Amino acid sequence: MTKAEEIFRQTDQIAGLQEQIQALNKASWEIRRALPKDALEISLRARTFSESINYKEGLAYSYRNSGTAYFLLSHYHQALIDLERAAAFFESSPDRQAMASTLRYIGNVYQSMSFYEPAIDCYQKALLITSKENNVKGSAYNLLNLGYVYEKMQKPGLAKTFLLEGKRMLEEINDELGRIYLLNTLGNVTFSEGQTTEAIAYIQESLDLSTKMNFVPGMALARKSLGMSFLMMDKHQQALTELYEGLRLVMESGETDLIADILRLLSETYEKKGEYPQALRFHKLFESKKSELKEMSQTILMNAFRMKSEVERSHLEKEQYKKENKELEKARKEIELKNKELERFSIVASETENVILILDPDGTLDWVNPSFERVNGYTLNEYKEKYGHTIYEASNNPDIRKIIDECIASRKAVYYESANTLESGKVIWESSTLTPIFNEKGELKKLIIIDTDVTRKKNNEEIIKKKNKDITDSIIYARHLQEAILPPQESITTIFPESFILFRPKDIVSGDFYWFSATEEVGFLAAADCTGHGVPGAFMSVIGNELLNISLHDPSVRAPSAALGILDSKIKGVFRKGRKETLAQDGMDIGLLVWHFKDNLIQFSGAKRPLILIRNNEVSEYAGDRYSIGGKNADSTKTFTDKTFTAQKGDMLYLFTDGYSDQFGGTAGKKFMHRQFVKLLLRVSSLPPEKQKSEIQKAFESWKGKQEQVDDILILGIRIP
């Protein structure tokens, strides 16, 4: 028996419906953290009862409780809808604590979706209420949440201030559940400040408290934090031990976000260990979990029919009890109470806008609600006369028989969509839930279909499809613009007759770009990899191309290292304006080559990109400097260096980005890696450039197999004439 079923049995004994609703709401709120699925089920029953008697206060608390449960189950969109409904009621309610708790959970939803400013606003409003009401526990939780969101915003000083004050309050009232979450967050903040021993002590204390209380979500969260800490300390085996235990625990609570976090950390740990197949496996699981949307559904009529069965069983049992023990009055009252509850469910079924059909086991249409008649324009008998007596004849879905067979075989609800053409000729789309009802012997008694009008959703999907097409068309046009700023192959072959360009964007547009310029004395060639790929990377590439033009036409530039220094300064200038927090993400890696024709001298300078020289079947690699252009260390002084050598006829020079070597593939599903890439260049270096390009492409396709391309690819190859 689930906790929800246990509470339903208890509350069924309460005489008044309003008192039942209050008891249900109280129970739902008390178990929300430990058992969010049960809390949700209880809150939905409280809502159904509240709607049946128009009990607004009960409805408000049920919305707060269901919104909270949806949040804990990572269903953020529905959580926000329900919590906002609750807040609208509590705005004018004397129960200020209920308003504060609702605001706190709205803040939690915003925080989980990375909308930090509105989250802070909600937490501060909630803190104002709890402070005014002298609610120490509520204030402590609001301080905990403020600390957590400032940790997410990478403001450890502010985060720690709020967390330490919250810790003091929770210790004062001995709230161990609150301390579990607070200590975990405090450990993460302390770790980010480099205090590893103290940080792990905080997280371990959180784990110990969770274990003592047998609080599974807290244990899972602490294991994740310990695993992340050990990963950052390069203690990979300890990290794996903690993360696997955290994953085992979190599968019990079903917190989608936490599952996704642990899968991501497992992938990163295996990648650091060099175990790429495992890294790729957990990366795919992480991507799948991230996009997963769990549909929680519970049909009112299903409950009604279950309750009807309970009533029938109760009636028989009580009749027998009456004969044997002469307690007729007691039995009659209990059955009457059950029938009243069933009647309330029937009222809801009659008033809902959803179309509801009840079928016999053979598919015969048995009963429909008033919404069916309103939508279709026929009574049930008229509909049968026109379209047939069974769902197999009447349904607009050509696969209805297969759908029903699958539903009965699985003994679970199934979902499908159909287009329904009304008598007026109007087409509406309906999303249907088909639920089988079995008796205690396992025999099929009824089939229930609940249809929801999703025409607006379908129309919106068409609008979105058109907008996606418009966006894609715009991006394709942007590709043409990007291609227009790239130097044509012909201009490069005038200086380097034997050369090739392998340019393969991951998306329609690319974050990689190549650049070429020449005077009578020198030729310039560059390969650059901007932050990201797709549209963001493409914007960066356009900016980088233009700034490279400016840098190399600066009269002070005498060497490629000087050009990179100017380029770095200009990139920082572009992105510093009002965006200090994102400087670490805006930049590029680049390799820049200068060929002095008269002296046959090659100068090279790189920002995290190398130059490969192959001469007489031997490889020389000239490494770039360890800085990117812009990006990390944006406020530090960078010194780029030049590598110089005399070119010889027949030398093969290669500039490239990291997309090729980072590609997952092969039989083990691991990265191609730089060493193997250099070996490939050596193997093809004696071939004509276009043949080299062809062989490199074939090797890439063979390695990639069915895997997706992970990054933009750019390789420039030139032979010195």
Image: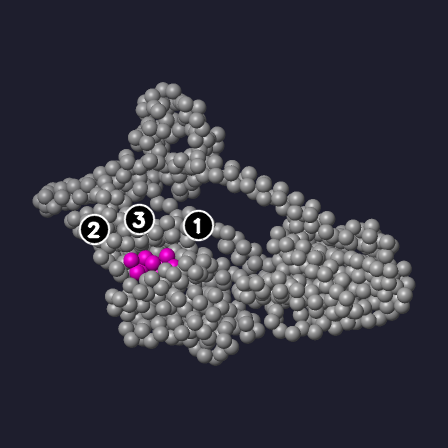
Residue at position x 82%, y 54% in the image: 492
* Residue 449 falls within the magenta-colored stretch: no
Q: Alpha carbon of mark 3 to alpha carbon of mark 1: how far?
A: 17 Å
Figure quadrant of the C terminus: bottom right
Judged left or right of residue 615, residue 408 is: left
Disc 3 marks which residue?
44
Residue at position x 37%, y 26% in the image: 376
Query: How many residues crowd around disc 2 within 10 Å: few (fewer than 14), some, or many (20 or more)?
Result: many
Residue 453 seen anywhere in this rendered image of the structure: yes
Figure quadrant of the N terminus: bottom left
Residue 585 in picture, x, y percent from top left = 59, 63
Q: How is the image coloured?
A: one colour
Sequence-first disc among 2 and 3: 2
Judged left or right of residue 25, residue 77 is: right
Disc 1 marks which residue?
294
Q: Is mark 2 on a helix, strand or loop?
A: helix
Label ID, residue 20: 2
The stretch in magenta equals 99-107
